[in-house]
Amino acid sequence: MTCANHPERERIAFCQNCGKPLCQECTRTVGSAVFCEPCLAAKLAGTPPPPGAASDARQPGAPADTVWQSGAGMPSGWQPPAGPNPGLAALLGFIPGVGAMYNGQYAKGVVHLVVFAILVSLADNHGIFGLFIAGWVCYQVIEAYHTAKARRDGTRSPIPSA
């Protein structure tokens, strides 16, 4: 899918207000939210987005029924982009390093595995590290879920390391 404003560029995100696909140049990020220029201006002004901003936008080359409607949130016929499944990522997060690797973060997966191995070796001598192992596994599950959700939705991950 390409950018709604620049058909020659690949989309990297969707506007969270009107659902238009956006390229790097068109995205306006506020915290972890992504907006197009008209929706951000309307949000900052406290008014609804201009009628022409999202209501008549069409994806170049898309079928005629794929029209973004102002206030609808997502375009009719919109399908979420192919990406990691957050539920599966969370499930795989219980296996040290596999959740991150499923999300395409291979170096992070290796680091998760190394940290897990170190905690296991420390728990052999000092039982308190067993609690750290449980905490580390919980962190991996949560991190894999949020990273997969952000990658699937085309937004920035709320976890800084992602």
Image: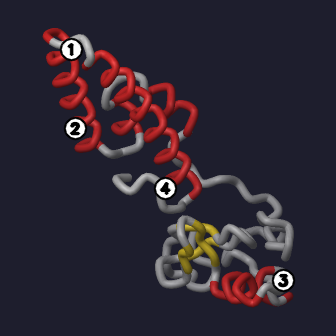
**Residue 58 - label:** none
Nearest the eye: 153 or 9: 153
Residue that numbered label 2 is attached to? 111
User: Horizontal and vertical percent for residue 48?
Assistant: 84, 83
- The amino acid sitting under disc 1 is Ala
* Distance between the alpha carbons at the discs numbered 1 and 4: 31 Å
Structure colour scheme = secondary structure
Q: Is residue 61 left or right of residue 112?
A: right
Dot label at residue 123: 1
Q: CA distance from mark 1 to mark 2?
A: 18 Å
Q: Amino acid at mark 2?
A: Val
Whole-number angstrom distance, CA of label 4 to CA of label 2: 20 Å
Q: Residue at x 60, y 54 (%)?
A: 81
| Sequence order check, earlier mark of 1 and 4 | 1
- For badge 4, the amino acid type reads Pro
Chain-order first, disc 1 or disc 2: 2
Q: CA distance from mark 4 to mark 3?
A: 27 Å
> Which residue has dot 4 on it?
158
Residue 48, disc: 3
Among numbered discs 4 and 3, the one appearing first in the sequence: 3
Q: In the rendered view, would you say 63 is above or below 157? A: below
Mark 1–mark 3 Cα distance, whole angstroms, equals: 56 Å
Q: Quadrant of the N terminus?
A: bottom right
Q: Residues within 10 Å of mark 1 (few under 14, many from 20)?
A: some
Left or right of 39 on screen, residue 156? left
